[in-house]
Amino acid sequence: MEPFEAFNSTNPLVKKYEQTKTAGKNKYFDVDEFVEIIDFYYFEQKFSQAYTAVEDGLRIHPDSYDLLLRKSRILIEFKQYDQAIKILKYLLAQDSSETEIYLLLGFAYTEKNKFSKAEHYFMQLLKLTDDLDDKLIFLRNIAQIYFNKKNYSIAYKYYQIIHRINPKDTNVLYDMAFCLERQNRNKESRDLYIKYLQKNPFSKTGWYNLGVVYTKLEELNKAIEAFDFALSIDPEFSSAIYNKAHILFRLKQYHKSIDCYRKILKLENKNPSALFFIAKNYIELKKYRTAAKYLKQALRRIPAFPQAWFEIGRIYFLNKKFDKSKNFVLKAIAQGEINSDYLKLLSKDYIHLKQYNKAAKALHIATLTNPFDDEIWYLYSEVHELNGNIQKAIEILNSAKDFIINRVTYTLRLAKLYFISGQKQKARQLILDAQLSDKNNSVSNFVRNLCTKNKKFAQFILKN
């Protein structure tokens, strides 16, 4: 605990206590006086002073129930849960009707993540409480304890009880909806937010959270509507503007998305995230110079911004300036972020620069980072094919078998490699397998793309 520091209180009793402390004198205070002093410090959140006062009090009144109860509260504030629990159990043995002890014990056990023990004391507390208003207060306290611990499933259970007892309390609908959303029970969450908003139509956070849930449900136009309602209540609600902007980007409404991010810039001058996303929109609009301008502004605000370095690299790649692209992607990777998308673009730069060994090295790391990206495996195999090592290209695709998602394309690519290596019987069998499992016309699309790249293999597929 920290050394005692006078608070210079205007409370006469606390002032008197502090004067005795600073003078180094011992003056007698009775239990009620110590309770007043401790409670003053506690509610002012001066827990070190409160602890000193409770220790002083217990030296004079060692068996005081009220002082020991206050000591347990302060120990909980200092996260000394085991010591607090020991005192609380001692007090419980003296008086099993004190409701606060059950609440404090339940809280201490939740902080220790011992939820079954916490539940035991919370249930005891509720059994002891006959008054309905008191019971609702305790239920809300218990729900809040679990909510703060991010144990949303148990918090939701208590909010449900509150709602059953007092269905007129519409605020609990919001709490229930929030807990459901955190558990990804999004349809149920949506329904409760709608019910809540019917009673509280001017709740900007209610509309905002409904927008978040609609986004998770991929009901994007409804999400925009919900964010617009939030913004009609508070036009400067930046979180709602951000989320609306993100959705507009996903819907390819790039100009509208840019307008939203510009509003963010007015509210939060030179916000690097807004600058970055404006650039992303301009990249999609193929306005690469404008995009680069915004990315550079973002980097002036935060030089350690790997996504911005990467996007500049992507702009150079799209403009076929592969050497410059490579340098910017390497800067993104140098920020310490191992990202399969960065490695994939870097490998493409190296392939265009005919630096196949470097491309292979980048792709090897990418397969370890994200083994379920089909394109990474195809590029990794292709690099060795371009480098003249067909057998290695085949080995890579064979090792990817358990990770590949599009099985037909994978089988045809492997067949192509066997065809190039002269193993036509294996290639023929793989083509047959692909044709038998093709449900999305993948073989025809694959042949169409091959016609400009490898006409011999395309003809081989058509014959088989």
Image (spheres, helix red, strand yellow):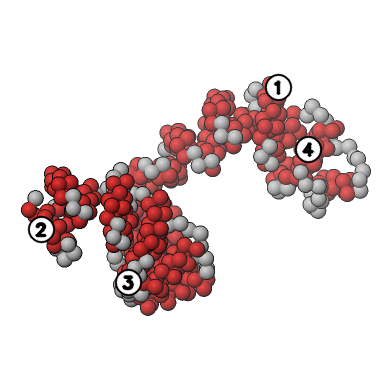
Q: Earlier in the sequence, mark 4 or mark 2?
A: 4
In front: label 4 or label 3? 3
SS at mark 3?
Answer: helix
Which residue shows up at 85% across the image and 32% down it? 60
Tell me the kind of residue under disc 1.
Gln
What residue sits right under mark 1 in the picture?
94
> Along the horizontal axis of the image, is 93 left or right of 19?
left
On residue 459, which mark appears? 2
Q: Nearer the viewer, residue 149 or 126?
A: 149
Q: Which x, y percent locates residue 222?
A: 30, 55
Residue 54: mark:
4
Residue nearer the viewer, 447 or 42: 447
> Which residue is at the front of the view, 353 or 209?
353
First-in-chain label (2 vs 1): 1
Q: Earlier in the sequence, mark 1 or mark 3?
A: 1
Where residue 298 sits in the image (x, y, percent)? 48, 71
Front disc: 2 or 1? 2
Label 2: which secondary element:
helix
What separation in Å lies between label 4 and label 1 (alpha carbons)?
Answer: 20 Å
With respect to residue 408, does 121 lie above or below? above
Query: Looking at the image, how many numbered discs can be counted on the residues?
Result: 4
Image quarter of residue 112: top right
328, above or below 127, in the image: below
- Quadrant position of residue 137: top right
